[in-house]
Image: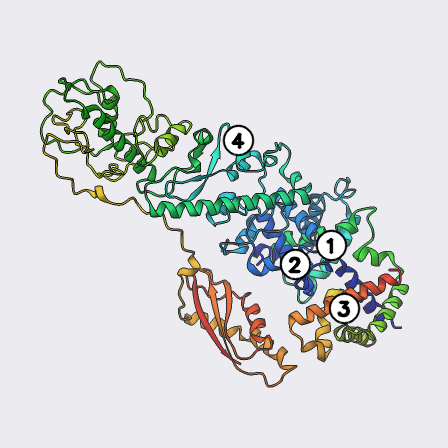
Amino acid sequence: MPSVRDEQLLASIRVGDRAALHAFAELIREAVRELEIPGVSDARGRLDHIVGPLRARLLTRLNAPDFELRGSLRGYVMTFVALRRDELEPGAAPTGLRRLELADTDRLASAVAAALHKLTQSHNPDARELAHTWLALAEEGQALDVRSGHETARMLKTASPILARKSDGEFAGALRAFRTMLGYELGKLGF
Amino acid sequence: MQANAKQILLLAAEDAFEFERWRDAGPVTADIDPETRAAEVAEFEALGIPLPSELDSLRRELEHAPKVREAIRCSALAMRRSGRASASSLVALGPQQLMHAGASVPWGWPGGPMIDPRLAAHMGLVGEEPRARSRRERKLADATVVAADGGSIDAQVVGDYDPDDLDDPDEDLEDGDDDLDELDDFDAQELARARKREAERRKKKRRLEARKARAARAPAWDDDDLDDDDRDDSIIAVAPAGTGVDRNTWILGGVSAVAVIALLWIAFGDEKDQPDQAAVDAAALIAAQQQQQQQQPPPAPEPAPPAPAIDPNTGLPYGQAPAPVVDAPEPAAGGGGGRGGGRGSAVRGSGGGAAAPVSGAGGGTAFGGFKDVPGPPGTGPAPAGGGTTPAPGGATQPATQPAANGGAAVVPAPTPTPTPTPTPAADPPAEPPKPAVPEESLLTKSKMTPAIRQGVTQRVGDLLACLEDARVGKPDLAGNVVFTVSLDQDGVVTKVDIGKDEVGYGVAKCSAKKMRRWTLPSAGIPIIFDVPFAF
């Protein structure tokens, strides 16, 4: 449960309060400094080239409709940055969104489409259903208002009658298997 | 391919790439967005608060994802180091169930949780000890001393304590650098060592429990393996929490009484050929003085006729230099063992704990740094074996008619034996303090207050959403569900149990999950009540 102060700050950030956004960027900057990431935390300057994209990604998360802050905002920011430490560290192997950014988006999109089509033939019925649903969402596309993969994954459950029948745990397990398979297939395609 | 479709496919790729770091974790982390949970775990770790059960299970699953584990550890360390995780989160977290007995240790910290070792000891986690972060804390955590009430309490090693006999010698490594750096070089070898240490401590705890049970059967302690005087030489124990007469006092008094009886018997047993009764052994006199001081000042039935004036400070006649204090002579045969005297004299800084009894009924204490808690009146030491009551004025009034054959150990008292005072002299020693009963178990179910009922009614929509979700697959879902809800004094739901579930299909579980996020009108006190629902 976040404190009232954090809730207020979060609400201000969501509505785009300028001072709150500035404070939020400072929060990210402090997190980057405190995490002692080699090559980043010890660099002089305001680190805007790191803090800016991080803030954009964090704002996407915070603005997601189902986002729920459970601890303090500082704790969330700190853990968010720490989870992406390998993306920030210069010279580290590209992972996560960095891997996405380094890839050619057109090629990646077609690779995902190929992988999803392949997964529609999977022996795992859940993976099959999820792949079908992803492809259906991509075809439907027009009305989709999502900004992150997490958000879309949450939407998948209501987009499929089979998945909607599943409990939270079952759906989470199915999603986990599907994500693993998709990542493996994309890796095989060179991503 | 449309542009929107491309974006959606890229979202699928992003989802898969982001999931890579969680992939090695168990199915619990397959939650759609586990980041907020991971942040919560990190915050708990930073604050050193034991995790609630649901977070604890999640954290155990996260242990298998190295990147997530490392991220949580780093963020928790950073928050700890900056001290910024503290106030708002603590307030926001509200009253938690701090720890339950047998709680497992957090995984992310080499060697154990960041719980104060004293807290862990009181919570029954002596065996699961956190990794000490400095030399001093390690010492606090290492030593365990048998308290007067028979339990084990923490102690501080202040002198030439040798940890080799209790623990791995490697544990005593000097560590002067920053404690946070210490966590970084954690490796498997150290983990194995920690496990070994834990096993030893468990074994020791079992030994202590067995000893406690033995002591409960026979109040007079016998010798055991803690009687090595040179080992106890450097231990100062923490004062026991109990307020009753401590066991050491009883043991010390029993030993003294037996010693006095034995010495008097030696002194007067063959006194037929010694006409001068005044020539009593000096040691017997001193011991008798000690015995007299430890006893409740009895009502003097008759004035002592030729007794010289006694210096109350030294226990000797005025003008006579006090003899160097020696340990209480041990009785010739059996009876209580030398534990009390030996232990008392072995404690550093005892200030004459055993040899110079502190004023008060309790006698000397084995804890040198602490004042003796004055016992209740009349708590003189009971004789251990013979059951004979020494004469109250035994030291200054030697027996006039010693036993002829010396067979009886009873000291004949020439004066009429004073009536035993009705004070609680015969009371048994105070019972050891009972462990505190957790507050949760003291609560009984009560009814909802009208305000709480209204609050629940307003939030029924959350539960109906769970039902509607489940009805997608099975439209005829219906039945009764009873939840047992625990509220704290602020109205925050702390626990929701499913008492009865006739619906199934995860409706009750989903509803309970949502109810755990509720904050209902406060009843002013923590309460537990049932919430029945008819879906």
Provide the secondary structure element on which disc 3 rests. helix
Left or right of B415 in this view: B373: right
Q: Compare residues B200 and A127 and report the one nearer the observer.
A: B200
Q: Which callout, 1 or 2, points to the residue nearer the camera?
A: 2
Residue carrying label 2: B61
At x 59%, y 86%, the residue is: B476
At x 71%, y 79%, the residue is: A162
Residue B162's tag is 4
Amino acid type, residue under disc 1 in the picture: Arg
**Relative to B431, residue B332 above or below:** above
Residue carrying label 3: A178
Mark earlier in primary sequence (2, 4): 2
**CB under 8 Å between discs 2 and 4:** no
**Relative to B124, residue B495 above or below:** below
Do dots 2 and 4 share one subunit? yes
Left or right of B316 in this view: B121: right
Residue A55's tag is 1
Amino acid type, residue under disc 2 in the picture: Glu
- Residue B5 lies, in percent from the top left, at 84, 71
Amino acid type, residue under disc 4 in the picture: Asp
Q: For the residue carrying disc 3, how many other residues have a C-alpha within 10 Å: few (<14), some (14-19), or many (20+)?
A: many
Left or right of B153 in this view: B362: left
Residue B535's tag is none
Q: Is residue A65 visible?
A: yes
Q: Which callout, 2 or 4, points to the residue nearer the camera?
A: 4
